Amino acid sequence: MDQQLQTMINNMPEKTGKSLDEWKSILKEKSFAKHGEALNYLKKEHGVSHGFANTIVHLSKNDEQEEVDLVEAQFKGKENLRPIYERFKTEVLKIGDDITVVPKKTTVSFVRKKQFALFKPATKTRVDLGLKLKDHELTNRLENSGPFGSMCTHRVRIEQTDEIDSELLGWIKQAYDAAG
């Protein structure tokens, strides 16, 4: 389902004329009380198909609260790792203004047109960062994807905020560039 949803989000500009973020802004201005009202508005006023309209409304509803709740749940019992996530997110969002942060149950995806980074609180003392870096050699720090499988090509283990350094940010920028 995550792959299908991502495909739908990727196809949204071509199929509906606007990106998901643009649709979210439109709905935020209108502030509909009910799902059905927003759904009908998108279908009637903008000619959006039912499937896309439903997805847009669903992803727009309580967007910020859902993100907070999903991220909070990931760090339950691992609160000491939260500063790593906050620093990582801040630094990644500086790379480009077309990045979407997609929290899930156990990970947070960072997406351009495709996912380029995957953040996961792995243990009580470490987070794993998955990156998509095609044809990039492994190093002591830049390992094979490990538990991420085919979702990423490489993994970096992070235990401290100061490990989010220029080398790591360089790899993230490369992954971001390739996802565009």
Image (cartoon, rainbow, N blue to C red):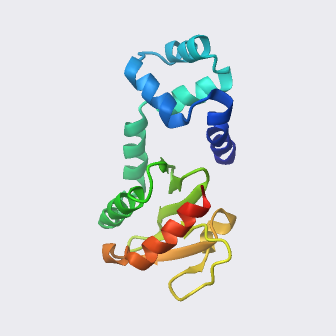
Residue 84 position in % (x across, y down)? 34, 66
Question: Does residue 53 appear left or right of residue 126 in this picture?
Answer: right
Task: Indicate the quadrant where residue 27 lies.
Answer: top left
The residue lying at 48 percent from left, 63 percent from top is: 120
Quadrant in which the C terminus appears:
bottom right
The residue lying at 58 percent from left, 17 percent from top is: 46
Residue 146 position in % (x across, y down)? 62, 74
Task: Indicate the quadrant where residue 96 lies.
Answer: bottom left
Quadrant in which the N terminus appears:
top right
Residue 92 position in % (x across, y down)? 42, 60
Q: Nearer the viewer, residue 48 or 2?
A: 48
Q: Does residue 173 sit above or below 140 in this rendering?
A: above
Question: Does residue 55 appear left or right of residue 102 in this picture?
Answer: right
Q: Does residue 160 sit above or below 39 in this rendering?
A: below
Residue 148 position in % (x across, y down)? 61, 67
How many numbered tags mark residues here? 0
The residue lying at 66 percent from left, 71 percent from top is: 134
Q: Does residue 115 sit above or below 19 in this rendering?
A: below
Q: Does residue 90 sit above or below 26 in this rendering?
A: below
Q: Nearer the viewer, residue 79 or 159?
A: 159
